[in-house]
Amino acid sequence: GTARHDREMAIQAKRNLSKTTDPVERLRLQCLARGSAGIKGLSRVFRIMDDDNSRTLDFKEFVKGLNDYAVMIDKEEAQEIFRIFDKDGSGTIDFDEFLVTLRPPMSNARKEIIMQAFRKLDKTGDGVITIEDLRGVYNAKHHPKYQNGDWTEDQVFRAFLDNFDSPYDKDGKVTTEEFMNYYAGVSASIDTDVYFIVMMKNAWKL
């Protein structure tokens, strides 16, 4: 049902965009209008630009990242967002902090069920889900492309992981952060905790 959620979420985000004046919310909605991976996509753009691996961005890099990601934003609005995130006034923002704030807020109950699913998939318990982890948890043999001989078991696993992976950096590994970012997107389109938890339990047999 993820594709359907994505469509609903994109429509909802576009609708809300016309109503909100809060700059951070506007940026969040522009990302969500691209579906569950929208916020992850922006984080990927920032990572590429962070040449010195400082995990911080100055204003120029920040604006360039937004432009590269084709976010519609004027300079004043960008400055306002940057000021909100540059809490200590150092002229740089920490982009992990930025992404966490940009993620749609989730209740603890939702975060907990997402982590349960993550732990179930992360067989080796090292904080990263890989193809190896999936072997014992996810049955590739039911996949139509496996059944008709198009894909091997590993290709099915890889396609599955790619759903959660950062859009331009599919390395076949899914971190807790990537998994959370993905489900923060899904979560934004689901109104009640109860429904979200039921959906997660069914999806992952928790």
Image (cartoon, helix red, strand yellow):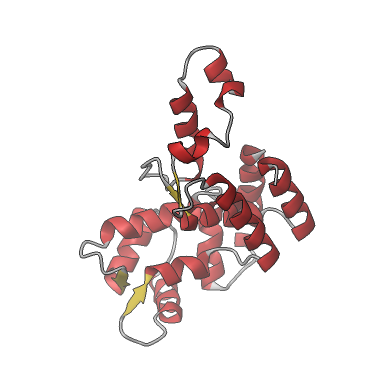
Relative to 165, 10 lies left or right: right
Which residue shows up at 51% across the image and 45% down it?
A: 123
Residue 8 at what x, y percent from top left? 67, 46
Furthest-bottom residue in view? 88
Q: Quadrant of residue 168?
A: top left
Residue 80 at what x, y percent from top left? 44, 78
Which residue shows up at 37% across the image and 54% down it?
A: 44
The answer to whether residue 94 of the structure is visible from this angle is: yes
Relative to 62, 84 lies left or right: right
Between 2 and 172, the one lying in front of the other is 172
Q: Identify whether 55 is placed above or below 182.
A: below
Q: Quadrant of residue 154?
A: top left
Relative to 129, 147 lies left or right: right
Which residue shows up at 38% across the image and 68% down it?
A: 95
Residue 63 at what x, y percent from top left? 34, 66
Which residue shows up at 59% across the image and 19% down it?
A: 144
Residue 10 at what x, y percent from top left? 60, 49
Q: Identify whether 206 is placed above or below 138.
A: below
Between 26 and 95, the one lying in front of the other is 95
Q: In which quarter of the image is the N terminus?
A: top right
Relative to 162, 139 lies left or right: right
Q: Identify whether 89 is placed above or below 61.
A: below
Q: In which quarter of the image is residue 54?
A: bottom left
Between 198 and 182, the one lying in front of the other is 198
Tally of numbered discs:
0
Furthest-top residue in view? 148
The answer to whether residue 192 of the structure is visible from this angle is: no
Between 53 and 157, the one lying in front of the other is 157
